[in-house]
Image (cartoon, helix red, strand yellow):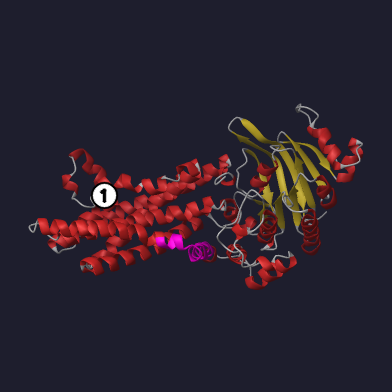
Amino acid sequence: MNEEIVRVERVSKRFHHAWAVRDLSFTLHRNEILGLLGANGAGKTTTIAMLLDLVTPTVGRITLFGLDVARARHATLSRVNFSSPYVDLPHRLTVRQNLTVYGRLYGVPKLAERIAALCDHLEITNLLDTRYGNLSSGQKTRVALAKALINDPELLLLDEPTASLDPDVADKVRSWLAAYRTRTGAALLISSHNMPEVERLCDRVIVLKQGQAVAEGAPAALLRRYGRATLEDVFLDIARSGPLSTGSERGS
Amino acid sequence: MRRAGSASRVFALVLRHYYLYRSSWTRVVELVYWPAMELLVWGFLTLYLRDLGPGLPNVVALFLGALILWDILFRAQIGVSLAFLEEVWSRNLANLFVSPLTPLEFMIGQVIVGLIRTVVTATFMTALALALYHYNLFSMGLALVAFFCNLLVMGWAIGLVVSAMILRFGQGAESLAWAVIFLFQPVAAVFYPVSVLPPWLRPVALATPAAHVFEGMRVVMLEQRFDAGLLWNAVGLNVLYLAGGIAVFLWMFRVARRRGLLVQVGE
C-alpha cells in the first residue's frame, strides 16, 4: 500500500443546528484518486474545507502526511493545493500576476519558468497577460487549475474541476489530472457531479448523503453491488432512496 | 518544493496589492482625492479664521497640523481595512488561507499595505499644505516622527478590529471600514484640548492614544516644547490597542473557521 496522505477519523461538522458532515472516516493514499460524490448539500464542500483547515471539525481528527492539520498548518498546507469554481482569484490582476503571487506564497523556485511550463501545459499561455476578470468561466477554471498546480502539490483537492468547461476542454483537464497523478504520484480528491468523469478518473469513490458516507468503493465494485450499468444510476438509486436511517451501506 | 519563508509570503501579499494599484488608477486617485478636498476646505477656512481673529495663536499651524495628523490616523486604519476588503471583494480569502500563509503574516501584509498608502497620502498632503498655505508640517521637528508612528499604530489596531468584524459579519459590515474611526474623533482631541470635553468624557479621551498625540502636538506648537509624558502615554496605550487588535482578529479567525465563514465571505 502506498503512503497514507489523508486520514479522516470519525469527523463530524455541525453548523448551528444541522449536521453538515456526520461521522465521516476515510483515508487517501499517494498515487490514488478519490471521488467525493453526493447531491447538493451532501457535505462534499464542507469535507474539502475541513481537509484544508478552512473549517474546524466539531468532532474528529484529520491528519495530512501524518500531521494534525490544525496544529501543523504550515507544514501540511505547503504540500497541498486546491481549486474550486466557488473561490476566485483577484479580477484586476493578470493571469501571470496571480500565478506570481501564489507562486511566492508557496515558495516555488524558478517561478517564471514554472509559470511558463504550467501555462504551456494547460494551454493558457496566450492568456498570461490578460486580466483574470476578463476571462470566460472556462478560462478561469483552467487558470484556477494552474494556481492549484503551481506548487506541484502532493495532495490536490478539486471541487468540481470541470464545471463550466466545454466537453473538449473538460476532456483535456481530465487527461492533465490523470497525467499529473502518473507523473508525480500525488493523491487527488475530486468532488464532482459528473459521473462519467468520476468513473474515468477515480480509483475509489465515497458517496455522501446528508453528510454521511453511504457507499464507498471502486467504481466497478459499486456498479456490481448496486446491479447498475453506470455510476450515475448508482448515484440516483442512493439519492432517491429516501432519508437515511442510522445505518449505512459502506463496503468495498 | 522549497518552503517559502515568512517574509516571502508577506512580500507576496504586498506584491498582490502593488499589482492591483498599478492596474487601477481610480484606487490611486482615491489615495489623494479626499485628502486634497479636506485640505482645501479646511485650509481656506483656517485662512479666513486667521484674518477674522488675529488674536488666535498659530491658527493655521494648529488646524492644518491637526488635520494632516488626523488624516494619517484615518488612512492608516482605512489602508488596513481596505487591504482586507480587497480580498473579500475578489472572493480570494479561501485561496489565501489554504496556502501556508498564517493569519499573523496576513495581518503584517495588511499593515505594510496600509503603511505604504498612508505614506503616499501624508506626503501629498504635506506638499499641498506647503504649496497652498506655506505650512510646513516638519516644523514640528522630530516630534512629528513620534506623532506619526503613534497614529499609524492606532490606525492599524482599529483597522484589524474592523477586518475582524467584516470576517465575522460578512460584507454587510463593510461600511464599518469608513465609519468606525469617526467614533474616536470627538474624544481624540484633534482640534481642541481634552479639557474642553465634559468631565465624564475625559477618561474616555485619555484612554485614546490619539488624544495624547494631539495634546502633544499642541504643546509643541503653542509652547515650543516636547512633552515626553504624553508620548509615553500614547505608546503605552498603543501597545494595548495593537495587542487587542491582533487578538480580536485571531479570535474572529478562529470563529470564522468554526462557522465556515472563510468559504462564504464575499459570496
- Residue A32 in picture, x, y percent from top left: 80, 53
Q: Residue at x 49, y 63 (%)?
A: B14
Q: Is residue B56 left or right of residue B180?
A: left
Q: Residue at x 23, y 59 (%)?
A: B43
Which range of residues does the magenta coloring cover? B10-29
- Residue B18 in picture, x, y percent from top left: 49, 65
Q: Judging from the image, what secondary structure is the residue with disc 1 in?
A: loop
Q: Report the chain holding disc 1.
A: B
Q: Is residue B88 left or right of residue A211?
A: left
Q: Residues within 10 Å of mark 1 (few under 14, many from 20)?
A: many
Residue B171 drawn in magenta: no
Residue B15 drawn in magenta: yes
Q: Residue at x 87, y 40 (%)?
A: A222
- Please say whether residue A233 is visible from this viewpoint: yes
Identify the amino acid type marked 1: Ala
- Please say whether residue A249 is visible from this viewpoint: no
Q: Examine the rendered structure and indicate whether residue A186 appears above or below residue B186.
A: below
Q: Disc 1 marks which residue?
A: B188
Image quadrant holding the N terminus of chain A, namely bottom right
